[in-house]
Image (cartoon, rainbow, N blue to C red):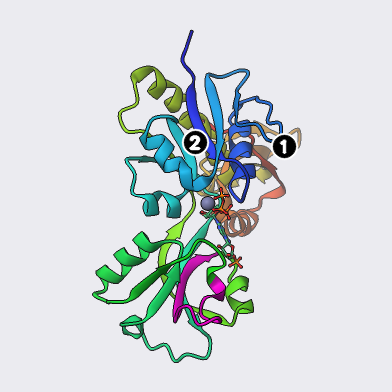
Amino acid sequence: MITPLRIAIQKSGRLQEDSLKLLKESGLHFSNGKDQLKTQARNFPIELLFLRDDDIPQYVEDQVADAGIVGENVLIEKQKKNELVKRLDFAKCRLSIAVPRSENYTGISYLQGKNIATSYPVIVQQFLDKHGIQAGIHEISGSVEIAPGIGLADAICDIVSTGSTLLSNGLKEVETVIQSEAVLIATPNLPSDKKQILDKLIFRINAVQSAKNNKYILLNCPNEAIEKITSVIPGMKSPTIMPLSRTGWSSLHSVVDENDFWEKIDLLKSFGAEGILVIPIEKMIA
Ligand code: PRT
Ligand code: ZN
């Protein structure tokens, strides 16, 4: 029997839903009943452990879990023996320093001798050291944003996404310390049977991610425009061209990167493309 690869994901919170969604899109079927501590995929040798995100790096270091999904902020803060295997493109945020809006912040030297409240003392210390600043770090585990208001600290360092939490607490963001997103981590030097399972999973995640970043495009064009259009949307190898029943016209199928999609559409229209259809792709393997 194959020993399953054990992956730790967040039990509840901001990472849980997207972690499960990614694994499901990668073709794993499992039941995830509420309050379960672990579950086994029905069609793939993977077992999921549901844990608090802060504990995942330690479990991975101890090899109780072989891999895990955490925010990069937690990975860096915990300083465990974890390998960053893959960035996962969700739960994007940044860890930033913020000060009361009324303060005249002139630059990083403002922080010299000040007190900073944070749940990320290691990352903050690294940041201060890098800039040669001496400041006090006051570690608190939650509601960091209220610290300046109650006189606990002069500044805070916390996760920012939209910025509305800072705004509603009378704070302004003054320095970005790190950018973060969800990451897949693993124990370094996994045994080869488990490494093989992890590699298969990574292959599938890559297919899911490429599909998200690309669209399938179909259009009609006069035959003389095929060459120009192909140079704009070359696709994976080359576009598929099929003749239309109307003489002198073809249907061209290709793949286009989501990011430069609108810009390319304008160009394609200027070359004479018509009847452009753009369709989502579910999985994409180059
Ligand atoms: O219970 P457990 O310990 O597992 O969860 P947790 O409460 O520690 O973590 P959780 O679920 O809040 O966040 C998990 C991970 O999501 C974090 O480690 C980040 O990597 C990522 N993430 C992404 C965020 C946010 N966005 C985010 N906006 N984590 C927290 N926030 C909070 C932030 O702390 C602040 O209070 O949201 C507020 C700021 O949001 P804006 O939109 O107002 O700027
Ligand atoms: Zn946590």
Magenta-tinted stretch? 145-160
Residue at the (54%, 63%) spot, across then down: 142
The answer to which quarter of the image holds residue 171 is bottom right
Task: Report helix, strand or loop for mark 1.
Answer: loop
99 or 185: nearer the viewer:
99
Task: Report helix, strand or loop for mark 2.
Answer: helix
- The x, y position of residue 113, in whole percent, is 31, 82
Q: What mark, if any, has residue 247 been given in the picture?
A: 1
Badge 1 density bin: few <14, some 14–19, many ≥20, Cα 10 Å: few
Residue at the (55%, 81%) spot, across then down: 150
Residue at the left extreme of this rendering? 132
Could one spot residue 96 in this view of the protein? yes
252 or 264: nearer the viewer:
264
Which amino acid does the dot numbered 1 rest on? Thr
Which amino acid does the dot numbered 2 rest on? Asn
Q: Is residue 62 left or right of residue 206?
A: left
